[in-house]
Image: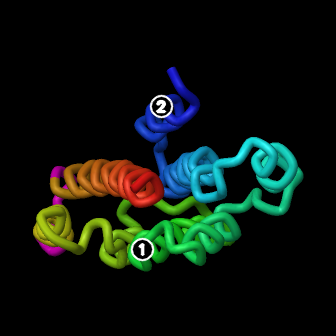
Amino acid sequence: MSREEELFDAIDHCETATCFLQVSNKIINLKLKELLPQVFVQDEFVMQYAVAPLIKEDGPLVTTDVVSKLIFAMGKISLETYADIGLYDQMLDYALNQPAKLSYDDDMVYEFITNQATLTKGEDSFYLDSINQLKFSSFESFSQMRYESLIKTVLKLSCEMLIERVTKEILE
């Protein structure tokens, strides 16, 4: 099992949205660093002496923000993909600066979902419709549990779809 698969499995065990954001951001960072060499000139010398030092653990291309900016600037990912990556990074920063861990039913988690291009375009917008139906229904305990479960599922799907889109855009 790859590190990415292990992390996706770990998402299932996250009890809070803060945990989800930490794990999903690790997945995004891992995927970006894995795909980063593909955006450079495919020359052995260039890879060994220019690219390898940039992407090693103490190199300048360690953070998701810097790597995504570089890949976007090189025209390898769309503005929507870049914005969604940035949204994950910003939401994690927000969550880590809160006094308590964010729960899945937190209004900021809802806003995070509704601002993702991955979920608001095309056929995937039905996820938002489902969330809205539960969010604005009468909140009995059963509805609350269903709502949180749906949020957790949609968050995982959004991360998976973002990873797929990043991979597709960079490798095209």
* Image coords of residue 151 (percent x, y): 30, 57
What secondary structure is the magenta-colored segment mainly?
loop
- Residue topped by disc 1: 78
Q: Position of residue 30 (x, y in %)?
A: 61, 46
Q: How many numbered marks does the figure carry?
A: 2
Which quarter of the rendered picture does the C terminus lie within?
A: bottom left
Q: Quadrant of residue 148?
A: bottom left
Could you tell which of marks 1 and 2 lies nearer the N-terminus? 2
Instruction: Residue lying at the far top in this picture: please name it.
Output: 1
Residue at position x 52%, y 36% in the image: 4
Residue 112 lies within the magenta run: no
How was the colour assigned to the protein in this rendering?
A: rainbow
150 left or right, relative to 168: left
**Magenta-span inclusion, residue 141:** yes
Q: Nearer the viewer, residue 7 or 15?
A: 7
- Tell which of 154 and 124 is nearer to you: 124
Give the number of the disc on residue 5. 2
Quick one: 75 or 118, which is closer to the camera?
75
126 or 121: which is nearer to us?
121
In the picture provided, is 26 more to the left or to the right than 54? left
Q: Is residue 121 left or right of residue 157?
A: left
Disc sitting over residue 48 in the figure: none
What's the amino acid at mark 2? Glu
Q: Secondary structure at mark 1?
A: loop
Q: Which residues are magenta?
A: 136-142
Residue displayed at 20% across by 51% down: 146
